[in-house]
Image: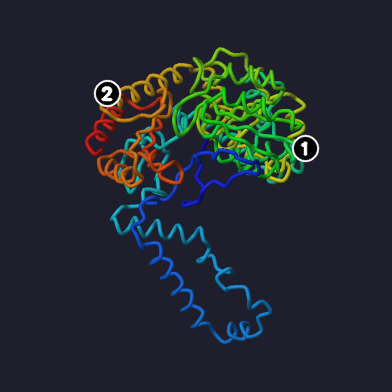
Amino acid sequence: MQAADNPPPGSAPRSGDAAAEPAATPTHDAAPGAAARPAGLAALARGRLLQRLRGQADTAGPAARLHAAQDPHPQVPAAWCRFESHPAYERLLVSQAAARRMDVDNPFFRVHEGAAGATTRIDGREFVNFSSYDYLGLNGHPRIEQAVLQAVRRYGTSASASRLVAGERPVQRELERELADCYGAEECVAFVSGHATNVSTIGCLLGPKDLVLHDALVHNSVLEGIKLSGAHRRGFAHNDWRQLDALLHELRGNFERVLIVIEGLYSMDGDTPELQRFVEIKQRHKAWLMVDEAHSLGVLGSTGRGLAEHCGMPPGCVDIWMGTLSKSLAGCGGFIAGSRALVELLKYTAPGFVYSVGLSPALAAASLEALRMLREQPERVQALRDNGAFLCGYAKSRGIDTGRSLGFAVTPAITGSSLKAVQASNALLEQGFNVQPIVHPAVEERAARLRFFVCASHTREQIASAVDALARVS
């Protein structure tokens, strides 16, 4: 799922309200060195922080001292009013201090000076890029640029308000109709953000009398949506449909509505679920099934239609199809495809749609043209599949641990250490390859990794050179 898609560095997932729920593995990047904290360093960093805060208080002007003298809440520490003393910020400072002490450059937030696809430009230098979701090589394609320019000339750059207030634009509805057709669904609704699509949809559909069962590696946006809904939640082991079945046997009778959430292609590991198993289970236990297709649309299936095509299943077997527009479809935003009742409910009640500005006409035009190109040019999907299989297979032949990857668009290179992942990323950058690390607490420390996203437009030489370079620095 997404996008790129990172929580604040140093953050950790929070549990839901169901008893004895297994912890879900977070799926986002964190600051470098988060797992490498020499003894005493945390205390030292916090001590310096407190000294700085005390110094600021001591040098405060007369107005501040007068305010302190008249303080109606002397029991409330001043630190509670300072972002600098927020616990999450303190953890971030500790992580950054540890990285500096180990002479490890921060690999995050590098500035890319042009369109990022199979290659990118950073600080005036061109790199082979494996940190882009441009799976089909459509970002910046002339056809898409022309569609965007026409939309801007006709509609401007903004939808100006929510679609309930500002009304519809034809290009928005065209995109939704063609996405619905792609999934064999009655209707579709597009949101301005992929993350908000999951948050608002789950938050809208479920409540305190309901239950959500989700894969342990599901995206952060799903977990946030569950919190918003107030529903109970239970995680099940990754892709373990047997455990899901057992949980439903135990719990189904205690709740009204039950939602099962899985992903089409898992963005950390590059593997897929057995859709047939999950469909059979949801039918037998009278539950809804939601599939997050953020990384599988344009990737899975012979024509890129996603998990259902990949598994040979009719798309109507899934109740809620979720996807994003920022990856294969070269835009930004998210969508839900399903029944007409589902979509109408979301369009009138989902907070992330009702109270948010509508999808920009220019972005809708970009994704609409990309979707049409996906249909017209299935050879792009085949090129992506060939490149993904080559990267995964060649990496294994060079002794690199690729985890559970099935060789589609995502292949991890497990390093087993956050420090090693960051060091390897920086070493590869020096050799002309941009590959981002995934470190603790985004994954378990032993599962720290580099994460390769492959594009249809990568060459075999680029892929082989990057793998060879990684094998040398590992």
Residue 92 placement (x, y as % from top left): 45, 57
Which amino acid does the dot numbered 1 rest on?
Tyr
What residue appears at the point 30 percent right and 52 percent down from the top-left corner?
A: 104
Residue 193 at least partly seen:
no
Which amino acid does the dot numbered 2 rest on?
Ser
Question: What scheme was used to colour the molecule?
Answer: rainbow
CA neighbours of label 2 inside 10 A, class few (<14), some (14 to 19), many (20+): few
Q: Are marks 2 and 1 in contact (CB under 8 Å)?
A: no
Q: Secondary structure at mark 1?
A: helix
**In the picture shown, does residue 183 fall above or below 67?**
above
Q: Which mark is residue 220?
A: none
Residue identified by numbered label 2? 397
Residues 297 and 287: in front is 287
Residues 407 and 340: in front is 407
Work out which quarter of the rendered image holds the C terminus and state it: top left
With 42 as the anchor, is 240 left or right in this view? right
With 316 as the anchor, is 396 left or right in this view? left
- Residue 118 falls in which quadrant of the image? top left
Q: Residue furthest left?
A: 472
With 435 as the anchor, is 69 left or right in this view? right
Q: CA distance from mark 2 to mark 1?
A: 53 Å
- Residue 349 falls in which quadrant of the image? top right
- Residue 112 falls in which quadrant of the image? top left
Q: Secondary structure at mark 2?
A: helix
Q: Earlier in the sequence, mark 2 or mark 1?
A: 1
Residue 437 placement (x, y as % from top left): 38, 42
Q: Residue furthest top?
A: 312
Residues 23 and 385: in front is 23
What residue appears at the point 48 percent right and 23 percent down from the top-left corner?
A: 299
What residue appears at the point 49 percent right and 14 percent down from the top-left corner?
A: 302
Residue identified by numbered label 1? 348
Residue 394 placement (x, y as % from top left): 29, 24
